[in-house]
Amino acid sequence: MNVTGRWWAIAGTGVALVALGAAADRPILLLGAAGLGAWLLGTAAAASRSMRRLVDRLAVEYDLTAATALVDATATATLTVRRPPETAAAPLAVSVDTPPGVDGEGMTVSLALDPGTTEATTTASLSFPIVGRFEFPTPTVEVGDSFGLYRTRVRLGSAPTVTVTPRTPDLHVGQGGEKIRSAYGEHQADRPGPGVTTRELRQYVPGDDVQRIDWNATARLAETYVRETEGETDRQTLLVVDHRRPMSVGPEGDRPLDYAREVGIGITRAGLDRGDPIGLWTVGGSGPTASVDPGSATQLYGRIETLLYRLTPTGDGDAREARSVVRAQTLAERLDGDASRFARTLAAYTSDADPYMTLLRDDPLVGTVERIRNRSGREGLIVLVTSDAQPTELREAVKSAIRGGGRALVFLLPGCLFEPSGLTDLDAAYERYRTFEQLRREIDGHPRVTAFEIAPNARLNTVLEHRRATREVSR
């Protein structure tokens, strides 16, 4: 409880009376000062009791019309204050603030209740220019006494939250132009994964863990076979979302990153519905930009969604373009026997494939996936959301994701469908989409990898319909 300017004026009067009484030897003035002091002490005790009683019985309601909103949309905030008549002798003021990132009018002005007033309500319009999850602060209540000598401030009432989401893009998730209903999938015991029960024997595929090779079957069949075991039914999901420069192509709201965000949020909410622990890694031009350790607490899913909503494209950083080992060997063969200075300079880099493997590991996406797999071991489903801009690095990232018997879901965004001028030549667009589809099928071919395409539905349909019409005309 704090004192007001009026209290200081009365206290100053008491001090002046003491000084005058002592100087003029007038005891009556000293008695007056003592009376003022006793009155101040009495009013302080009475004010403390009344304020405590008022705060205990005061109702402050601060509500929003919706708990979720679209970016640039508006919502109405309502502030209501009620108090019993027996506590209405003193003035009362309630003020509220809007969190950073929310625009509002009138909500920072106090709502005042004069003595005798028991209820008041005010409303204001709020707008949300950016996406994210916003927590509004609890209203501040300032209570005074009937004499205007004391006041106190407390936080009281509800503190609403609002989740602001971007406007949903025209999203297609599927394979080969065909939509799918659920990419995350149900829990199944009949799936490859770490376990003890043998599921099947199958031929070795590059990227398989050599520790999973069944040497008895390999010796008997004269080909390399690996043993798949039956996975556990509960699943930890490790979500990796790429937001490097290729994800920024196109106008805001219709970029690859906007579609990747929708998929990431969908995976997060599917995990919440099933109670699966989920973690998040975001990858920028220089490496990981944010991470959330896997967990199943409700607030953790909200934190992941907030990070995804706030994700923006980054630059290329220090990442270097990597070549595959095959290309390195091809270059080495072409330079063999060349005695020029240029050939001698390149020989140091092409004579051994290891430097190129180092470059691949230096790639932000590959390095991040390797880091995740090293931390999680064989456990966990890794979900990659990225573009087709760097096929070599993508293949290496997928290999790292499934190393040791792990599983991966890959969501690929075809760059040809996001370029602003990408549909000016539909024949060329279709050929580029075919190249993308070959890459997706190649990745999807591994038994522990499932690859999907993410694309603007209207643009993909335009390309595919043009191809169908062209084929019908050619007949």
Image (spheres, rainbow, N blue to C red):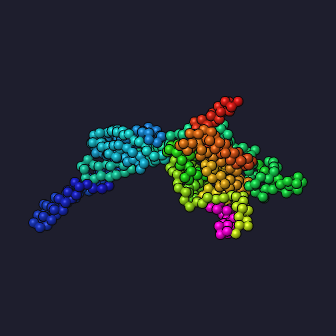
Residue placed most toward the observer, 467 or 190: 467
* In the depicted structure, whether residue 417 falls above or below residue 380: above
Residue at image x 57%, y 42%? 422
Residue 312 within the magenta-colored segment of the rendering: no
Q: Quadrant of residue 419?
A: top right
Range of the magenta residues?
340-362
Of the 4 image quadrants, the one containing the N terminus is bottom left
Q: Position of residue 261 (x, y in %)?
A: 56, 46
Q: What number of labels is visible?
A: 0
Q: Position of residue 62 (x, y in %)?
A: 40, 42
Residue 342 within the magenta-colored segment of the rendering: yes
Describe residue 290's horizontal placement relative to residue 127 as left or right: right
Residue at image x 68%, y 56%? 396
* In the depicted structure, whether residue 124 falls above or below residue 308: above
Decide if residue 141 is in sight here: yes
Q: Position of residue 286 (x, y in %)?
A: 56, 59
Q: Position of residue 101 (x, y in %)?
A: 42, 48
Residue placed most toward the observer, 386 or 234: 386
Describe residue 190's horizontal placement relative to residue 363 as left or right: right
* In the depicted structure, whether residue 465 falls above or below residue 260: above
The main secondary structure of the magenta stretch is helix
Residue at image x 46%, y 38%? 66
Of the 4 image quadrants, the one containing the C terminus is top right
Residue placed most toward the observer, 203 or 395: 395
Farthest left residue? Answer: 24
Decide if residue 159 is in sight here: no
Residue placed most toward the observer, 439 or 147: 439
